[in-house]
């Protein structure tokens, strides 16, 4: 099945899975979801949840990449993570904007994919694509539930949305929770290394490299919760707990 982006004039090879996803990470570019929530997605899979990634753009051009190379890197990272599904919405890299056309395209994808939970980019960053993607996710989540519309699929509203860190600004926002990814840090880092054009080619091997930074941040967030490695998530709404025992059992 192919999703069309209407007046944007593009055709995107977004093949709809046979069964709905439980968790869908939405990424401005291929590699953002790996940086922010690869461990979380692996942890969800270990709990029996169906997980996927929807990249909004192909991430190109970049100094050492190309659309063909980035596609191969994305396929390799997808295989490392063992995702249940991955697609690309085909929006323009470097000029990603929260337009009505883009909102409609993403909302239509959500109506087809029907995820129960979204993982979206954190809303504050120096990269305009990341800021636009975060706003776009919020609006498309709302639009996906609309009735009396010619958007594809049937109304659907993902019950929860969290925001992950793939942030260029040197800021330290307080998360709503931190996911323990201690058992999946090696696969997370392996998936990121698949993006050789982004993290290895043309880079100085001197410490710290971008890979060192990603690893060390995961170690910091693990320390913050008394575990080896972690990934932070933000939420605009309070989180539910069945009682204080939820935190004693951890």
Image: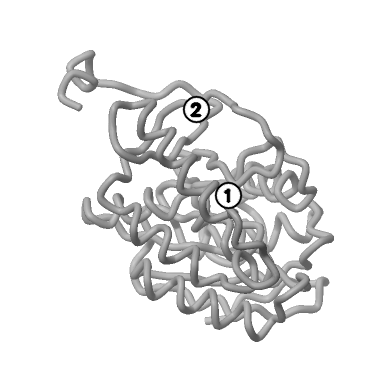
Q: Bin the neighbour count of mark 1 within 10 Å (Cα to Cα): few under 14, some 14-19, many 20 and up.
A: few
Helix, strand or loop for disc 1: loop
The x and y percentages for residue 218 are 43, 42
User: Dividing the picture into quarters, in which one does residue 22 lie?
Assistant: bottom left
Along the line of sight, the residue nearer the viewer: 19 or 47: 47
The x and y percentages for residue 243 are 22, 15
Which residue corresponds to the image point at 51% horizontal and 24% vertical from the top-left? 237
Q: Which one is closest to the eye, mark 2 or mark 1?
A: 1
Mark before the other along the chain sequence, 2 or 1? 2
Q: Is residue 42 above or below residue 203?
A: above
The answer to whether residue 151 is left or right of residue 15 is: right
The answer to whether residue 136 is left or right of residue 158 is: right
Q: Is residue 10 above or below residue 204?
A: below
Along the line of sight, the residue nearer the viewer: 199 or 163: 199
User: Dividing the picture into quarters, in which one does residue 54 lie?
Assistant: bottom right
Which residue corresponds to the image point at 36% horizontal and 34% vertical from the top-left? 222
User: Dividing the picture into quarters, in which one does residue 82 lie?
Assistant: bottom left
The x and y percentages for residue 241 are 29, 21
Which residue corresponds to the image point at 60% horizontal and 28% vertical from the top-left? 172
The residue identified by callout 2 is: 175
The answer to whether residue 123 is left or right of residue 14 is: right
Q: Which mark is residue 208?
A: 1
Helix, strand or loop for disc 2: loop
């Amino acid at each position: 099945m192919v999703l069309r982006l209407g007046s944007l004039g593009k055709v995107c090879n977004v093949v709809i899975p046979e069964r709905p996803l439980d968790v869908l990470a939405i990424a401005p570019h291929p590699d953002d979801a790996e940086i922010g929530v690869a461990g979380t997605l692996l942890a969800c899979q270990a709990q029996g949840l169906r997980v996927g990634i929807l990249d909004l753009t192909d991430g190109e051009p970049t100094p050492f990449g190309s659309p063909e190379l980035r596609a191969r890197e994305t396929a390799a990272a997808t295989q490392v993570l063992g995702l249940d599904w991955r697609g690309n919405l085909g929006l323009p890299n470097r000029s990603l904007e929260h337009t009505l056309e883009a909102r409609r395209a993403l909302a239509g994808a959500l109506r087809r994919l029907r995820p129960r939970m979204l993982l979206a980019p954190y809303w504050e960053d120096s990269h305009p694509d990341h800021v636009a993607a975060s706003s776009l996710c919020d609006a498309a989540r709302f639009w996906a539930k609309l009735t009396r519309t010619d958007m594809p699929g049937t109304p659907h509203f993902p019950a929860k949305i969290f925001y992950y860190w793939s942030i260029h600004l040197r800021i330290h926002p307080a998360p709503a929770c931190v996911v323990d990814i201690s058992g999946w840090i090696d696969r997370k880092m392996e998936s990121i290394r698949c993006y050789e054009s982004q993290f290895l080619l043309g880079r100085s091997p001197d410490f710290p490299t971008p890979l060192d930074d990603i690893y060390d941040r995961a170690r910091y967030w693990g320390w913050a919760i008394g575990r080896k490695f972690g990934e932070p998530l933000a939420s605009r709404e309070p989180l539910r707990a069945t009682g204080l025992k939820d935190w004693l059992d951890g």
